[in-house]
């Protein structure tokens, strides 16, 4: 396989992950090849701009091998790759998929709704459920939300936050989180369960995790490799969200060649499935 790994001049997208991935690629160099690229490598050299700033290069301006490459890096880096070589604007977030939107997995009030259904009062966790890492907030909405956030920008120089009416948003009950874990599923099998926050003496419900993984794996539109984040609450283990295996935080350090194939699975999912978000509410 041929990989493109993000490496910026001053700072890698994540130094630890960059080291893990490149060390694996070097260890298995008989089977895999890689090069490094940075954000600026995607930008046109012409003094021209589009509505979003500097123009991206076209696919025919770049190395033809990149069409079949698997990019690894931060979200904005991978999305440039998607747009140039595959005409895909972004990867749709999975959040909690429809097959797992049950109280035994949620253990909280949880919804994915359009902008006009976002409550203006009360304490909630809200986030963009269409795109990854765009926006999130936890707390009192009445003190956070302003009418302008729901209006269109009146100037191209207005960089203040606005809700996107083409996106869906998660609105969920705030619960006490005692510990958080990431479950890594590689090729359909649980590879590791790694804690990343909270009480180290609390361990998640393994049977619930196995059941959730089996249920999600059985869906025709599920990725082969992904992470399943869970939290331990006073009511037990609950699913926080699921991420396709792209742009993931590698909280575990014991990796082998399976990790490289997991990135391939993640890339195949984005190109061939990239399932749009769907509405839901148990409020």
Image (cartoon, rainbow, N blue to C red):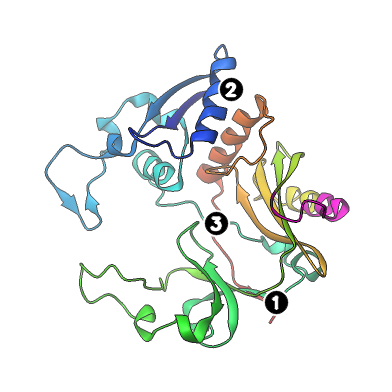
Q: Check disc 1 and report its element: helix, strand or loop.
A: loop
User: Disc 1 marks which residue?
Assistant: 109
Q: Check disc 2 and report its element: helix, strand or loop.
A: helix
Q: Earlier in the sequence, mark 2 or mark 1?
A: 2
Marks 2/1: CA distance? 41 Å
Q: Are marks 2 and 3 in contact (CB under 8 Å)?
A: no
Q: Quadrant of residue 98?
A: bottom right
In this picture, is 29 found above or below 126?
Answer: above
* Residues packed near mark 1 inside 10 Å, few (<14), some (14 to 19) or many (20 plus): some
Label 2 or label 3, whichever lies nearer to me, is: 2
Q: Nearer the viewer, residue 236 or 119?
A: 236
Q: Residue furthest right?
A: 207
Q: Are marks 1 and 3 in contact (CB under 8 Å)?
A: no
Q: Residue 260 placed where, x, y %?
A: 60, 29
Label 1 or label 3, whichever lies nearer to me, is: 1
* Residues packed near mark 2 inside 10 Å, few (<14), some (14 to 19) or many (20 plus): some
Q: Is residue 28 visible?
A: no
Q: Earlier in the sequence, mark 1 or mark 3?
A: 3
User: Disc 3 marks which residue?
Assistant: 93
Residue stretch in magenta:
196-212
Q: Does the segment drawn in magenta span residue 184? A: no
Q: Residue 272 placed where, x, y %?
A: 54, 44
Q: Earlier in the sequence, mark 2 or mark 3?
A: 2
Q: Nearer the viewer, residue 179 or 29?
A: 179
Q: Is residue 141 visible?
A: yes
User: Disc 2 marks which residue?
Assistant: 24
Marks 1/3: CA distance? 20 Å
């Amino acid at each position: 396989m041929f990989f493109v790994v993000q490496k910026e001049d001053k700072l890698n997208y994540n130094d630890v992950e960059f080291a893990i991935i490149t060390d694996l690629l070097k260890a298995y160099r008989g089977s895999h090849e890689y090069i490094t690229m940075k954000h600026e490598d995607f930008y046109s050299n012409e003094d021209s701009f589009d509505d979003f700033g500097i123009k991206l290069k076209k696919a025919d301006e770049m190395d033809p091998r990149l069409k079949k490459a698997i990019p690894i890096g931060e979200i904005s880096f991978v999305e440039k790759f998607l747009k140039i070589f595959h005409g895909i604007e972004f990867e749709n977030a999975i959040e909690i998929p429809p097959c797992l939107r049950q109280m035994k997995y949620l253990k909280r009030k949880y919804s994915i709704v359009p902008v006009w259904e976002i409550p203006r009062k009360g304490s909630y966790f809200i986030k963009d459920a269409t795109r990854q890492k765009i926006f999130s907030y936890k707390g009192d909405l009445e003190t956070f939300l302003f009418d302008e956030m729901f209006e269109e920008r009146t100037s191209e120089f207005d960089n203040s936050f606005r809700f996107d009416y083409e996106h869906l948003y998660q609105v969920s009950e705030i619960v006490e989180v005692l510990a958080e874990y990431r479950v890594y599923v590689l090729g359909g099998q649980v590879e590791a369960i790694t804690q990343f926050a909270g009480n180290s003496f609390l361990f998640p419900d393994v049977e619930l995790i196995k059941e959730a993984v089996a249920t999600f794996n059985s869906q025709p539109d599920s990725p082969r490799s992904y992470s399943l984040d869970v939290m331990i609450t006073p009511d037990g283990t609950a699913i926080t969200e699921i991420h396709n295996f792209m742009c993931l935080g590698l909280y575990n350090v014991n990796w082998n060649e399976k990790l490289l194939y997991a990135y391939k699975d993640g890339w195949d999912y984005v190109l061939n499935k990239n399932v749009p978000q769907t509405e839901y509410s148990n409020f």
